[in-house]
Every structure is written in structure tokens, then in C-alpha cells.
Amino acid sequence: MAMPKILQICHGQIIPEYISAYSLRCHNLLKNYENRLLVSAGGPVLVDKNMGNSRQYRSVLIMIMSYLKGNRAFEVFLSMGKYLRKKYVHEVIKEIKKSDIIIFEGPWQYQLFRPYLKDKFIIYDAHNYETGLRSGNPYENYVSKIEQELLKNAHMILSLSVNDIMEFKKIIDESKIFYIPLLTENKNIEWNGMETNNIVFIGSLYQANIDAVRHILEMSAKLPEFNFIIIGNVKNYKFKESQKNVKFLGVIDDAKKDMVLRSACMAVNPVMEGSGRNLKVLDYLSYGIPVVSTKIGLRSYEEYNTDNNIIIGDIQEFPEKIRYLCKNRELLRIQSFKSLEMYKKIIKSEGNINPAKIILNEYKKLNHDIN
């Protein structure tokens, strides 16, 4: 019997795959597994696009309506099928029928396609604990309902956060929860930012990153001697504020990203909310960049002694800590070494986890014979 076909149902932009940490997770989850397809709707895309095993469908109306509504309405509209193109819905149903394993990259589309999931092996790849992210949000109860439904009905739950797993254990039996971390490749690129005043931040178009950039714009006014370089499509947000020493690069290819990161004297992570794991932190560490971060920005890295390896502080303390680090440049070299050591510990601990093997083993337990 052939290896099972896997369909990953995503949301937002997933082409190119490095467009965001969410997209990277979707692509890297089963990177070397050939018999799979990724489909997605939403995001700032104006045309349908196919690339390799990925299909991205434009959904302009749902993006416009969710922007007007606010309060993270996009995912809610998506779960209801509101403003979605019929073409996308029909294509996904067609692919579900041809697939054996269905992975929902977020809980949003489970209810939408639930009538077509009979006899399918269902996986919830939980990038975040979505209910926790929406505490106080008008849609909190609705999100809690749909997330709990998928948690209870899925055959497997994949999570990239130890903290999120603790929340899931309050709802379901831990036997079907699996820790599948979000990792980056080891770059082996020499850090040469010790003599520069470049400070980097990576962020996709996501509310926590939008707020983080607002904080960067504020602190940049207090640190005119530094250059703040922002990578990612958070650039697409129309910030009212601007500073001469803040530069938005948008989405860039790996070669340019390597050049920017290796020449940064440090990275900042002024995020104030979120769930899951901040991939940007791992990216910074892999280049040996000294990191200044809020405590919440280091969620799911706690076991790697972050207090000793990363400069942690409240956002109002960032300017003071940045100046302190750069006053004695030897401190930057020491922090660079600590960043690389922390990265090596993470890879040693988590690098051998094989998601495809774990998924197929669970699939076989339900009397599915595969080669």
C-alpha cells in the first residue's frame, strides 16, 4: 500500500514559505514527506498561486471585511466560511476526499470541512493556544468552543510549546498530545556585528508584531545613534509613526537575510503577547546575535536557562540595556557566545524529533497498513 496522502489546511499567505513563522511551520512540519499538499486562503495576495506542493488562494473580500471588523476577526470569519470564495472551498473538499490524513494548521477550518472528514485521520497542529490568545476578545467564547471541539475530536494534537501543552492537558488526555518544536536550520555563518550599530527585528503581519514595531519606533527616538532594521511583511501595516533610523526591508530572500542578521550588533524582541514559540528568537540565536527580549517573548525557551543567555527586561528598560551592551563591546562578544551555546542546546535536545515518523506511527495504530 502506498504511503498515505496528507493534506495540510492552512490560512494566510504560505508562498513563499519563509513569508512568516506560521508558514515555515506548515512547510517544515513534513519537509521531506513527498505525498502531501498544502492549501491556504487569505493573506495579502491578489492572485491564486501554485508552487511545488503548495496552493495559495486569494481571498480579498475576507481580508477586507476582517480588517474593517478588527478584533482578530479573520480567523473567525474563516471558520464560518464567511466571505470565502466557493472555488477555495470546493478545491479543499476535493482534496480531502483524495487524502488519508488531514492536518488542520490551526482550529479555524475544522467546522467548515467537518462533514467531509468521515474515516479520515485528523490532526490538529496547534501553533498557539488560540483561546488563551483571545482572553478578553469579543470572540473568546466562540474560539474556545471551536478549539475544544477539535482538541477532543482529533486523533493527534501537535504542539510547539510546552506551555500550550499544559493548557491542552486540562481539556484532553495527554496521550494524544505530541511536542513537535519549531526549529530553524543551523546557519554556520560567522557573526560580524560587533562593530556595528544595527539592531534587527523580524516580524510577520501579526498583531503582536505590529505592537512590537510600535515599541521599536518609540525606543528608536531615544536611541538615534542606532539603526533599527525590520524584516518581514509587518512592513505592510500602515504605521502612522516614522523615524529616520528605522528601516523596513519587508520580505527578503535567505541571502539578504543572512547578510542583515550577521551584521546586526543585536536583536530585539519587544513582544507583549502571544502563545506558542517565537521562531524569531531561535533565528537570532542561530546567527549568534545577542538578544534583548521581554519575558513573554521567550515563552517555550524557559528550560534553556534564558535568564543567563538572553538579556531580559520590560520594554521601557530596552534603551538602557541596549546602551549598556554597546558601551563595552566585549559584552556583545560574550552575549554572542551565549546565544550560540543556547542554540546548540536546543538543537541537541529537539533536533532529532521526526514529525512524519511520529504521525505515521499513530496512523498505523488505527489499523492502517502502510509500507
Image (cartoon, rainbow, N blue to C red):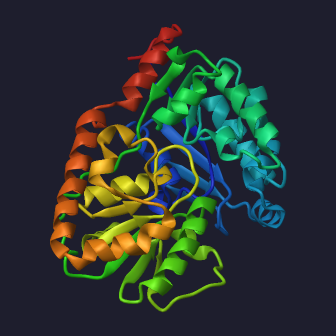
Instruction: Name the quadrant of the C terminus.
Output: top left
User: Residue at the spot x=47%, y=37% of the render?
Assistant: 161
Q: Position of residue 99 (x, y in %)?
A: 59, 30
Instruction: Name the quadrant of the N terminus.
Output: top left
The correct choice, above or below, for 247 with respect to 312 in the image is below
Res 146 quadrant in image? top right
- Residue 142 visible somewhere in the drawing: yes
Q: Position of residue 12 (x, y in %)?
A: 63, 56
Q: Position of residue 344 (x, y in %)?
A: 21, 45
Horizontal relation, residue 197 to residue 35: left or right: left
Res 330 quadrant in image? bottom left
Query: What is the number of callouts on the image?
Result: 0
Considering every residue shown, the one lying at the far bottom of the view is: 244
Q: Position of residue 280 (x, y in %)?
A: 41, 57
The correct choice, above or below, for 359 with respect to 331 in the image is above
Horizontal relation, residue 27 to residue 353: left or right: right
User: Residue at the spot x=42%, y=33% of the render?
Assistant: 180
Considering every residue shown, the one lying at the far top of the view is: 367
User: Residue at the spot x=17%, y=62% of the render?
Assistant: 334
Is residue 73 or residue 89 the one in the foreground? 73
The correct choice, above or below, for 142 with respect to 231 in the image is above
User: Residue at the spot x=44%, y=59% of the render?
Assistant: 18
The correct choice, above or below, for 205 with respect to 78 in the image is below
Is residue 337 or residue 369 the one in the foreground? 337
Is residue 17 or residue 159 the one in the foreground? 159
Horizontal relation, residue 279 to residue 289: left or right: right
- Residue 252 visible somewhere in the drawing: no
Is residue 149 or residue 226 the one in the foreground? 226
